[in-house]
Amino acid sequence: MDIFELTKALMNIPSVSGGEEAVGFFLRDHLSSLGWNVEMQPVSPTQNNVIATLNENPRVWLSTHMDTVPPFIPPTEDDEKIYGRGACDAKGIIAAQITAAEALKKEGISDIGLLYTVEEERASTGAKAVNMHPLAAKCEYMINGEPTDNDLAIGSKGSFRLLVKTSGKAAHSAYPEEGDSAIETLLDILEDIRHTHFPHDDFFGETTVNIGTIDGGIALNVIPPKAEAGLLIRLTTKREPIEQALESVIRGRGDIEVLSCSEPVKMLPIEGFSQKVVRFTTDIPHMPNWGKPLLLGPGSILVAHTKDEYVLKKDLIEASELYVSLAKKLLG
């Protein structure tokens, strides 16, 4: 399969987070047919990381994730683009990395590995599971793939996911003085959070807060005794000062439940590559044992996770060439 055929073959296999088993088996069989040694690392009864090598201790690894956000959108194409779920995030990236690895192999370079993880889009459970793998100790450089417009990302913001929960007292809505609305308390807290200035970092930029979900109440005629809001904060600092700032804003009116956290990361700059800092987070914070991190991939993060997700075919080809060039530079 060429790079476009491989991209579409991967995209034709639904792999929304938690359902990566089939695409993992496809990669196992495909890489085995190309002569790679493939290990399936169990993460759950139906999830496996895919680890492929040519020698015992590769120094440079290419990695990204196999899962996608919902819903499944099968691939279509025209002369310039491949459309559909995973086109740029991240099945086109997998195809570009395998194409690059095969090109390196043909030149006699075997000091490379391939690592494809599960559930990056939710909690990076695959990355956490593989961090202690014995091969990590010999890895010098990990080239991770995410849509960076084929620029080399030298930094990425962190991600802090949490719930703000409030409690009140249920009562008949005709007698509101008998109750205490958890929703109104939550709305007051969220309004204060919206007007809070969180830290700015000269390298990573602004800390931003997205109020992504709100839930609560029992019925229209009942004063709500419970409410909660889900927040995702793009970190430019460590978690602690942000959590402390939130606690100061909440002032005992509610509770914080932490869902997950990955802190901002600075990555290896390489001369000769266009460079930038990206606002999203990746598997990299959860794989500190896998050498010095780099981040590069085809496609735009602005179309990832949308109904119009696509990748330019020329960018897939360019990405495979960039991966080859990066690996050669890192291997000296």
Image (spheres, helix red, strand yellow):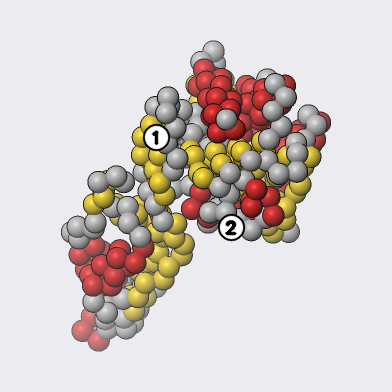
Tell me what residue is drawn at x 31 percent, y 76 percent.
Answer: 254
Q: Position of residue 185 (x, y in %)?
A: 25, 73
Residue holding disc 1:
302
Q: Residue most toward the bottom?
A: 178
Q: Amino acid at mark 1?
A: Leu
How packed is label 2: few (under 14 Cα within 10 Å), some, or many (20 or more)? many
Instruction: Name which residue type carries label 2.
Output: Lys
Mark carried by residue 113: none
Which of label 2 and label 1 is nearer to you?
A: 2
Q: Secondary structure at mark 1?
A: loop
Query: Is the residue marked by circle 1 packed among few (<14), some (14-19), or many (20+) residues within 10 Å?
Result: few
Classify residue 311 as left or right of residue 163.
right
Secondary-structure class at tag 2: helix
Q: CA distance from mark 2 to mark 1?
A: 26 Å
Residue 35 image point, x, y percent: 80, 31
Q: Is residue 40 left or right of residue 276?
A: right
Badge 2 or badge 1: first in the primary sequence: 2
